[in-house]
Image (spheres, helix red, strand yellow):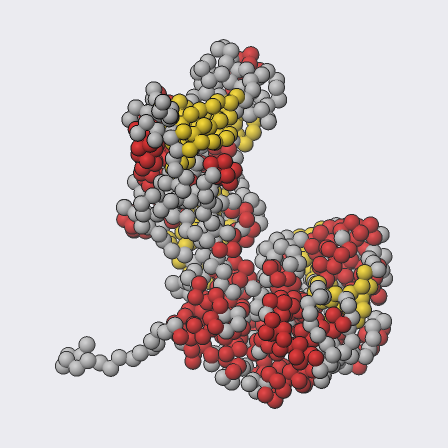
Amino acid sequence: MSNDGVPQKSVVNNVPSSDFAKEVEKEFGGEGIMKCIQCGMCTASCMVASMADRYRPRKLIQKILLGKREEVLSSELPWLCMTCRLCEERCQEDVNLAEIFHAVREIAAREGYVPKIFQNTINKVLEDGWLLKDAYTDFVEDDRSDLGLDPKLDWNDDFVKKVKKRYFNGGNKK
Amino acid sequence: MKEFVLYTGCTTPVRLPAYEAAITIVLEKLGVRLIPMKDANCCGAQYVESVSHTAFAAMSGRILAIAESMDRDILAVCGACSGSLKIVKHDLDHNPDLRAEVNDLLAEEGLKYTGTVEVKHLLQIFNEDIGYDAIKAAIVKPYNGVRLAAHYGCHVTRPPEIVQVDNPETPVIIDKIIEIAGATPVDYTGKTRCCGGPMLAMDQEVANKIGLDKIKNIRSERAQGIVTACVFCDIQLTQVQFGDTAGSEPKIPVLTLPQFLGPALGINFDKLGIQLNKISPEAILQVT
Amino acid sequence: MTERKAQAALVIGGGVAGMQAALDIANQGFKVYLVERTPSIGGRMAQIDKTFPTLDCSACILTPKLSEVSHHKHINLLTYSEVGSVTGKSGDFHVRIRRKARFVKEDLCSGCGDCAAECPTEVPNEFDMNIGFRKAIYIGFPQATPNVYTVDKENCINCGRCVKACQRNAIDMEMTDRTLDIHVGAIIIATGFELFDVSQYPRLGYGHYPNVIHAMEFERLINAAGPTHGHLVRLSDGRKPHSIGFVQCVGARDVQKGVPYCSRVCCMYSIKNAVMALEHYPDAEVSVYYADIRAFGKGFEEFYEMAKKRFGVRFVRGRVAEVMEGKNTGNLVVKVEDTESSTIRLVEHDMVVISPGIIPPEGMDTLATKMGIAKSDDGYVQIAHSFFGPTLTKVPGVFVCGCADGPKDIPDSVSAGSSAAMKATIILSKGGA
């Protein structure tokens, strides 16, 4: 408090609100988020957290519960989950973190927040029908023939175009 | 002969064709015939799955519907594909609106999902359709106790209520097969941890650390080889041993389950694509 | 002619709650049958070393009760017995008791122990949580009541040496089970609890790593009458531990394992165990890994503060994900997130003590069916009303106390015993009506 009695301007970090958590709860897969008691079992199990200091699944859930919508949606953190589900196996409150983070990703995608690598891969698969068209070299074709496997890989690329049209609005998520 | 339609997924045919060849020939020997799926598409795991649940359901749903049109159950050999197909099947079975939406899209090709096909992972075929007794009976050249570490893969075993392959905390199928074939299954710290594969997209460094942690734990049990049941895990556990941070210890051979079982069943190495394995397992595949 | 109603009560379970109920009924002049399925009364309290929050010696405060019960003229003590069938209604129950054969005559055995000295067969001692051994003819613990030996026929090799050794001819290998039919006006269920089987958590290593033990095993190790004479040692090599970790919420507050409820006593008993570890080894490092510390009762918060400040117990807020073992040392590494600093820690301990939650005892289902009483979702006896009938079941004349209707500590169990006794004697004092 300053001496002349004039109150200092306070900096507000976050006004807690359950709106974002409720939004995630309504999304497919996000149902269990309110059950979290922040015990840390998930983070202790998480191999990403063990190897990357910036990622703490418990804290990410906490941010959602506290209503930090903009921060969470624009961050790379929800995309760092490997979906290995060790956390889900062990969570004693039965919170399905990988499902919740998928729900968050879907909300993020709707608002245009998709990491480049994901977007590029999605674009590729919706174009070719599968992921590794460019990696299918002559060498690999030869290997397949030598093994007695059909060198012709018969992937369908029509269906993904329909999927793209219906759900991706020609490239961007609808 | 029991028949399954083989869904390879994107990765196996290109990155690990030996796995595809080995599965086909080993299962044939054990009384299961595989019919390749034609005109398939990516199951949508990881990427499409993350941004649109409906699009994901459509992509995996089409695979399920194709199998239905072939009147055969699906054998998925990649952990991610197996997980995706099973999860989408579960969602379609329990969610009539989603099912209607997906069927609407499939109708244009004359395909429909009604839920009559099952999705199985390779480990289920061994455990449920072939059975340990039949495998044991088919062993002609048993191993000599070589120490092997099994790596099951996260999407193969979890979430257990949906995939129903094995006990996720203490899985046994690969270990049992290792034992039946005369080798020694070895337990190690962090056996059910992820290989780090899915992390390659966002942060390769972290993915490598996770993979190398597994290698380190396996090495400390003096395992001579690693047996895998997912193409992605196999590739990841191999390639982390080649990175800059891998260290100078001799590399531990990584091989897929059918490549391990094949020699014990009397199948030639070259039919199993052993020569294509980046870390040659020939030393450990000495059978009697 | 007025209906002849029963003037006696039946108490099922000889733990501290059952004993309190029996004494309170008997002290009013009514007759009580106290049925206990193990060879001795005393229950869990007999196995505990010290109680929280006072650090009283459990056996010291329990044994006077054992004595009182066994000498009481109105209490008919039926140990090594089980309830067979129950018919009738409040004021007028007919119960068939099955008295299992102990192959030792209760009225002749003086508890001298000559038989056990001769017995060649040793088996793991259940009272010591299978850490120590007992003979095939045995007494559970030194103050077992009645102080009579029992033959474990399953492991007895019928060599006959004990029969020869007994100077009072108290051993009768031809003994058979008997039935006893009783007529009682009220029944009190005081069947206690069991520990959750923590081997259902493979990630914690119990059952695989010898130095991972659970709280009751810890209790027996620190107890002077226990298998190591009160020396807290590691089971792998008998050495004293320098660093001990306590893992909370195992088999409690776990939706996935079917035990969603809080087990109420584990926080406090673990703080007590942590303090006791430091009493044994003041230089040891002791950590407790928890989600919440529930120190709700009288003196509990103060006990918790004392554990932190006076004894230096480290409390880490984070549920333990994995316990790993170091091959050569038998040491353990606990993987946990310290949620207060968001740091993932790998902490080495040379002993890990898992704190199991408590669950309804085995056989609860059968008993509940026999008695026609309802069980709640978690398997415990359902009480009639949490405010006004915490010791009433939905069947008139049948009451419940102790842990049979839910986890409780010793003071609450004793209170409940008295409360149930009161309810029972209201019936009996009205001539059984």
Question: Is B192 located above or below residue A74 in the figure?
Answer: above
Between residue A140 and residue B72, name the one nearer to us.
B72
Q: Quadrant of the C terminus of chain C?
A: top left
Number of residue marks: 0
Examine the rendered structure and indicate whether residue C346 appears above or below residue C430.
Answer: below
Q: Quadrant of residue B81?
A: bottom right
Quadrant in which the N terminus of chain C is drawn: top left
Q: Position of residue C165 (x, y in %)?
A: 53, 13
Quadrant of res B39: bottom right
Residue B6 versus residue C166: which sits nearer the camera?
A: B6
Instruction: Identify the residue at horizontal 46%, vertical 28% (top origin).
Output: C95
How far across and down, in percent of the image, does residue C73 sit? Answer: 34, 20
Q: Residue placed at 54% from the left, 46% from the top? A: C199
User: In percent of the image, x 54 and y 51: which residue is there?
Assistant: C201
Residue closest to the eye, C383 or C380:
C383
Residue placed farthest to the bottom in the image?
A170
In the image, is B261 to the left or to the right of C215?
right
Question: Picture coordinates of residue A16 (x, y %)?
Answer: 35, 73
**Which residue is painted at 57% across and 87% down in the image?**
A172
Does residue C356 lie above or below C230 as drawn?
below
